[in-house]
Image (cartoon, coloured by chain):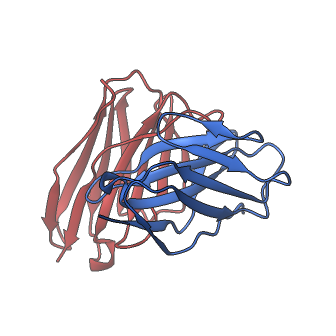
């Protein structure tokens, strides 16, 4: 099974950048790396995804290692609202239907 | 409208009760998902429906019975549950499940307590 490993928790000061790492050493060549986050008392929400190149959107950036065995989610300026559990996810196919395999997640605490 | 709604928000049921969880989306998505999430753990996939047909059942006990009456609705029927089934049940939807590249939209969940 494709698996991801993440640190259990991280802290950041408000308005500073945050780098959230993820290891996925068993990733296959066609697997995209997805990131979702789960704010307190809410369902997960999409953050970003990518295959090989670094990706940017309005929420974050995703830096993918050249060998694709690791990636880093970058929040450029953390706010209090960014305090959440961040999940690094790989997809897996069962008979042509894809599903997400969630990592254990990193709980991000943002300090005012 | 990018909202997935789930009802009820909270449910307490006894081990002999029968209850149902409901999920609805109006985004025209053709894939819908049920996840179970225990406290301080990541969501675990239970079922995937693709075009209203059950595509994935992650070896879920038969006391959980999913149903997809139409492309907008997803139910999870519960019967004879155990206290260890207490968890947050999350519903999600996506454009389809054929590539795994479409964003999944999650509902807020139903917090279930089995007494």
Q: Quadrant of residue A40?
A: bottom left
Is there any visible trace of residue A93 in the rendered image? no
> Looking at the picture, how far across and down is residue B12, in whole percent?
13, 66
Chain ID, blue in image: A
Q: Does residue B36 lie above or below A61 as drawn?
A: below
Q: Does residue B84 lie above or below A4 as drawn?
A: below
Q: Quadrant of residue B99?
A: top right
Q: Is residue B20 left or right of residue A74?
A: left
Residue under the point 79% across and 62% down: A26
Q: Does residue B111 lie above or below B81 as drawn?
A: above
Residue under the point 59% across and 43% down: A61
**Tint of chain B:** red
Q: Is residue B114 left or right of residue A57?
A: left
- Specify the quadrant that holds the N terminus of chain B: top left
**Near-viewer residue (B103 or B38):** B103
> Looking at the picture, how far across and down is residue B28, in whole percent?
40, 21
Is there any visible trace of residue B79 in the rendered image? yes
- Specify the quadrant that holds the C terminus of chain B: bottom left
> Looking at the picture, how far across and down is residue A30, in whole percent?
79, 42
Residue under the point 34% across and 73% down: B39
């Amino acid at each position: 099974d494709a698996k991801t490993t993440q640190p259990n928790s991280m802290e950041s000061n408000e308005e500073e950048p945050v780098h959230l790492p993820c290891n996925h050493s068993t990733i296959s060549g066609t697997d995209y790396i997805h990131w979702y986050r789960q704010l307190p008392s809410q369902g997960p929400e999409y953050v970003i995804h990518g295959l090989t190149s670094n990706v940017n959107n309005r929420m974050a950036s995703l830096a993918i290692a050249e060998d694709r065995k690791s990636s880093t989610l970058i929040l450029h300026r953390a706010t209090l609202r960014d305090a959440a559990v961040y999940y690094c996810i790989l997809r897996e196919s069962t008979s042509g239907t894809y599903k997400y395999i969630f990592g254990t997640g990193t709980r991000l605490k943002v300090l005012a | 409208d990018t909202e997935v709604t789930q009802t009820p928000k909270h449910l307490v049921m006894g081990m002999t009760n029968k209850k149902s969880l409901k999920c609805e989306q109006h985004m025209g998505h053709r894939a819908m998902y049920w996840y179970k999430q225990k406290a301080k753990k990541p969501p675990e996939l239970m079922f995937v429906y693709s075009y209203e047909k059950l595509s994935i059942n992650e070896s879920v006990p038969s006391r959980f019975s999913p149903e997809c009456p139409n492309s907008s609705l997803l139910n999870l029927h519960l019967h004879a549950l155990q206290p260890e089934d207490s968890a947050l049940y999350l519903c999600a939807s996506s454009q389809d499940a054929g590539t795994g590249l479409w964003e999944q939209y999650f509902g807020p969940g139903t917090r279930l307590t089995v007494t």
